[in-house]
Structure formats: structure tokens, C-alpha cells
Image: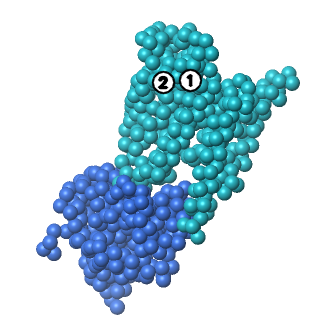
Chain colours: A cyan, B blue
Amino acid sequence: MRSRRFPIVQRRAAAALALFVAAMLALPFFVNGYIVSVLVVVLFAAYFGQAWNIVTGFAGQLSLGHALYVGLGAYISAALFTHYGVPPWIGMLAGVVIAALVGGIIAALSFRFRVGGVYFALLTIAFAEFTRILFDHFNWVGAASGLFLPVSSLARTDVLLLRGSPVMFYYLLLGLTLGALALCHDLLRRRIGYYWQAIREDEEAAQALGIDVFRYKVAAMALSAAMTSVGGAFLAFYENNLYPDTVFAVGRSIEIITAPIIGGLGTLFGPILGAVVLTTLGEAMTSLSSGFTVNGLKQWCYGAALLLIVALQPAGLWPWLRARLGLGAVRR
Amino acid sequence: MSAPPLLEVCGLAKRFRGLQAVDGVSFAVPKGGIVALIGPNGAGKTTTFNLIAGVFAPDIGRVVLDGTDITGLRADQACRAGIGRTFQVVKPFGALTVLENVMVGAFKATADRTAARHAALAILDRLGLADKAGTVAKSLTLPDRKKLETARALATRPKILLLDEVMSGLRPTEIDAMVRTFADLSREMGLAILLTEHVMRAVMALSHHIVVLHHGQKICEGTPEQVSRDPRVLECYLGSAATAAAGSG
């Protein structure tokens, strides 16, 4: 029974994915510039959520400081470009290496001294905050007054230098998000994916099965940090200005984790679904509350909606939706 | 007794704060042998297991597996050296299916997913868990969780399997079936087994050799018949009155 049902489910999932990709590819042709800019926000949230999901959703190590890697990726590629004219794709690679190192070192320091759980989470916040304050006084990157990229005409599209319209960024981010989806899908089917999930579920049992828990946790953090920094580089070239107080903000770290939690922690499609739902919700609240003059109404509604989702679907929206669509094996 | 034993434990000792949990314990498990570690609650059985499996390092003493000193190795290193162990308080990977749980163990021998899957399915079949392969581990009954512990440990292809009370909670017929499975595994694969168990029915049927611990010390060892007649064993299990009664009667 079970073995015969699998191929059908897989075919249905593949069809649903193809439909989703086709819709996302076509979307910019049918919507106005405002909607495209909202979609870019969706994709940033989806991609950062996917990257964070690897260390926390797959490997079970709660990071609350992922803004650190967004910032490293953003500042490294932007500073190399403004100071030396290094193309962003090269700067991005430098960012990847440094973010992976920083993430790996933070993880190695914590796990070597058996700092885990909430204490690890606090440590990740602390490192992000240190770095924010460091960059506030780092004159080479403009310190607190910010780093600005030369803005050229939006009409000219130069993919190599990441100069162009929101539509260009939309397609680049769509590619990045789908690439991350493919990578995560592949990782979960490999030994490393099984090991990460085993560590998440029970570290002691995982270790008794021969898993070098320390090494796999550090690897999860380094990969997650590296992926996050790529998104950070795109963010820098999309927004064209960087301030330590916004790039490294604790608020950004919290924003990054909301989409995957709402969508389904540890699932493949959860971060993407969560990003769509949250951003749509936020935009809807903005347009709804614009008719009223009650301060904070938007935030209040947004918070209430989040509470409702978490209360009704604590495992996230994607596991629920997947079952509705008949896209996943039913797990008893 | 001429061949060197597979597992040799020499003068193992471990102190927790004021408590001497294990105090100079020595014993050996031959290749393919089944040895039981018994004793009242708090005798130091699980601590001995943890010392062998690398959960913590002993204060004194040595653990030698197949000629290699594995004293003080981490749990994952001990596993790679050939020690497979189960936990008395079961630790399933709750969100994963039974098959995925066992595959995690099978990945020790291969990085290939299909190979790990086949190895895991064979073990599930062997332990009578095949029909639960797709079930999420957290929804298993306790007896099935105990079987899953064993299946996962077996999947790492250990030289010696450390079973920490895997029979408790099973019905007598299930106990007999498990005893048969372990006896077969040991005979066919030359697998050595070290077990602690409160279910005497299983201990007596399965073990070739029994080591009795009391207050962290070995008080006696021998065949099941020898141990069950030993006055020191009767005393620590039943109290001195029972020994006196047995002596006079």
C-alpha cells in the first residue's frame, strides 16, 4: 500500500512545484511595480528563512543572530565594490567564506564548551550585537552614517554588477530561492541530512550511533551562515544603502525566523510558504489600516494573526497544507 | 578461555560526587558470548554501560575492545570502534519514521541512502518491526520503542551489543521471541552481547555467563546455575534472612 502510494504523491508534488515555479516566473508580467517590490520582499524572507532553517529546523540549534551573516554578506560585497570596484559576484564569494568561518567559529566555541539550547541562542544574539557595535565605529564602511552604493539609472540592467530594476532582483532571488530549495531537498536525502535530524531529535542517541555531533552541528551553522551571507549581498545591491543599526538589527534576526516558524520549522517548503503568508498579511494589514487613524493597529492585527496561526497550527502551515493537497505521505 | 576476549573490562571505577557508582569492576565478554550484568537497583549496571560506551570516562580502569584500548573515547568514537548500545530510558528520534531511525544507524557503514535503506529494512524485518517502518517513532508503544532502540544499535553493525533493559515492559511471549532473536543473532553473526536486565526469565534463558554487581562492586560471576545458587547473590537480592533460611533449610 504504502510503497505504491509514494510515486503518485511524488508525481503530484512535482506537478505542484512545476506549477508554482511557472506562476512565479510569469508573475512580473501581470503585476505592477509595487507588487514586484512586495514579491522581492517575499523572496528575501523566503531565502533567509531557508538558510536559517538548515541550522535550526534541520539540525535543531536555535540561532537568534542570523542578521550577523546578512550583514557580513552585505557589507563585504558592498565595501569591496565601492572601494575597489570588485564585482558583487566575487565579493559575494568573499562574504560566503568569511560568514562560513564566523558561523563555524561561533558554533565551535559554543559547542566545544557545551553551550547549547537557549544559551547558544543568547550567544548568537551577543555576537550579532558585538558586530553591530563594531561596524558602528568602522570608518572604512562608513561607520554609523552608513555605506552607500553608487546608484545608476534603473533602466540599465547589468546583471554582472547587480545594477538593475526590481524585476531583475526578483528573478535573481527567485533563482536563489529555488536553488536553496533544491539544495535543502538534496541535503535531507543525504547522510548529513539524516544526521542533522537525528541530532535535533536526540543528541545523546545520535552520538551513540556513531555521529560526531560536534562536527555536524558546526557544519550546519557554517552552511547556514554562508547561505545567509549570499542573501545579504543581494540585499546590499538591492537597497543600495547599509546602516549597521538596521542591517545587524536584532529585529532582522527575529524577522528571519518568523517565516519558517509560521510555514513549518524543518520542512522544505515551509520557509517559502511562511514568507508568502507573512508578507501578504503585512501588506494587507497596511492597506486595511490606512483607512483608520489608530496608531499601531497594523502591528496589533499582524500579531493577532501570528498568534492565531501558531495556536491553530503549531507545526506550521505547510504540513497542514501539504496534507490538504495530498502532497505528502501521511505520517501516522 | 584461551582466545583473547572480545571485550575486556579491567578495574573500572567511577565516582559521582560522594557516590562510588562503580568500584573496581572487571569482567570479559568472549567473541559471540552473551554476558548478563545483574544486580539490584543502583548496583552500577547502567554506569558500567556508560563507561564502556563512552558517555563518560572512568576514573580508573581500562576498556579493551578486540585488542584496542577504547578507554575514555567519546560515545561516537566508541560506536565506530564497534560498540552498539541501547538506552534504558528509550531515546527515539521522535519526528522520524521507524525506518529513518534505523537508517541513521545504518549510515555508519555506508553513505549511500539506498544501501542504508536496505540494511535498515532487513534489520526491521529481523526484529518484527517491518510493518511499522513508515510509522513516526513518537507514536510507537513502549515495547516497540525498545525494539527500535535495539534495531538502531544493530544497524551500526556492532561487534558487541550493549542492551540496557530492553525486555522490560514486554509480555512473556514477546520476551521469549526477543530471547530467540538475540540468541540467533549471536550465533549467526558471532555478535557478542552484554545485557542488563531485571527480567530473570530472559537473563537465565539467554546468558552464557552472569556478572553480579552490588554497590558498584562485582560480588560474584559464573554460569546462570552457579550464580543462582550463590549465597552472596541471594543475600543482596533477598536480604540476609533469606540466606539464613536457605542455609538452615
Q: Can I make out residue B213 in this image? A: no
Q: Find residue A73 and name its label.
A: 2
Closer to the camera, B212 or A39?
A: A39
| CB-based contact (under 8 Å), mark 2 and mark 1 | yes
> Mark 1 falls within which chain?
A
Identify the residue at horizontal 45%, vertical 32% (top origin): A226
Residue that lies at the very extreme toward the left in this rendered image: B2
Eyeballing the image, is A112 above or below B239? above
Residue A212: image location, x then y, percent: 36, 48
Q: Find residue A235 and name its label.
A: 1
Neighbourhood count class around disc 2 (C-alpha, 10 Å): few under 14, some 14–19, many 20 upward? many
Is tag 2's residue or tag 1's residue first in the polypeptide sequence? 2
Identify the residue at horizontal 53%, vertical 69% (top origin): B132
Quarter holding the C terminus of chain A is bottom right
Closer to the camera, A167 or A314?
A: A167
* CA distance separating discs 2 and 1: 9 Å
Residue B2: image location, x then y, percent: 13, 74
Please tell me whether mark 2 sits on a helix, a strand or a loop: helix
Count numbered badges in the picture: 2
Neighbourhood count class around disc 1 (C-alpha, 10 Å): few under 14, some 14–19, many 20 upward? many
Eyeballing the image, is B184 above or below A77? below
Name the amino acid, label 1.
Leu
In this rendering, position of residue B80 left or right of residue B173: left
Identify the residue at horizontal 59%, vertical 56% (top origin): A11
Name the amino acid, label 2.
Gly
> Mark 2 falls within which chain?
A
Eyeballing the image, is A127 above or below B196? above
Closer to the camera, B235 or B173?
A: B173
